[in-house]
Image: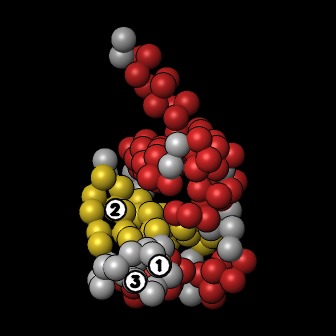
Amino acid sequence: MQRLIVDGYNVIHAWPSLKRLLSSASLEAARDELIKRLSVLGMISGEELTVVFDAHHSKAMSNSEEKVDGVRVIFTRKGHSADHSIERLAYQANQTGDVITVATSDRFQRDLVRGMGGAVISAVELERRVDEADREMTRRVQRYQ
């Protein structure tokens, strides 16, 4: 199985469109837009998508997880970073033989995932892939109109 794990806040801060939402709307709006765009990528690529967000300011004592438009969304528990959760997911995928790609521009995280045998793409490369998926979805919709 092909799996793509996204470092949520790393990507939000790297994409100009999402960064603008942080200042003009809210963090929640930026998260929602990222999830919406990842959903289209998942439909086009067939990859299983997971996005992980830090919840340092949350009082939650355990991870929360939900499926939103086909994207697995994980908020880490209080005191745990998204990096830790991503490392655990990458390790588990490696153990089950899944093909894993992590989208982050965090250098330490990239090195760690590569050391586990996973692939890594930058936030900028992820944005390029998402933009291409959006264009492909538009082409498919236009074909059926």
Q: Which residue is mark 2?
A: 72
Residue occupying the point 62% across, 47% down: 23
Kindly tell me whether residue 92 is visible in this rendering.
Answer: yes
Secondary element at image label 2: strand
Q: Position of residue 84 (x, y in %)?
A: 50, 85
In the rendered image of this protein, does residue 31 appear above or below residue 145? Answer: below
Q: Which residue is mark 1?
A: 56
Q: Position of residue 135 (x, y in %)?
A: 55, 30
Residue occupying the point 38% across, 71% down: 75
Quarter of the C terminus within the rendering: top left
Secondary element at image label 1: loop
Quarter of the N terminus within the rendering: bottom left
Amino acid marked by disc 1: His
Please indicate whether residue 17 sits to the left or right of residue 33 in the image: right
Outermost residue toward the right? 107
| Distance CA(mark 3)–CA(mark 1) | 5 Å
Q: Are marks 2 and 3 in contact (CB under 8 Å)?
A: no
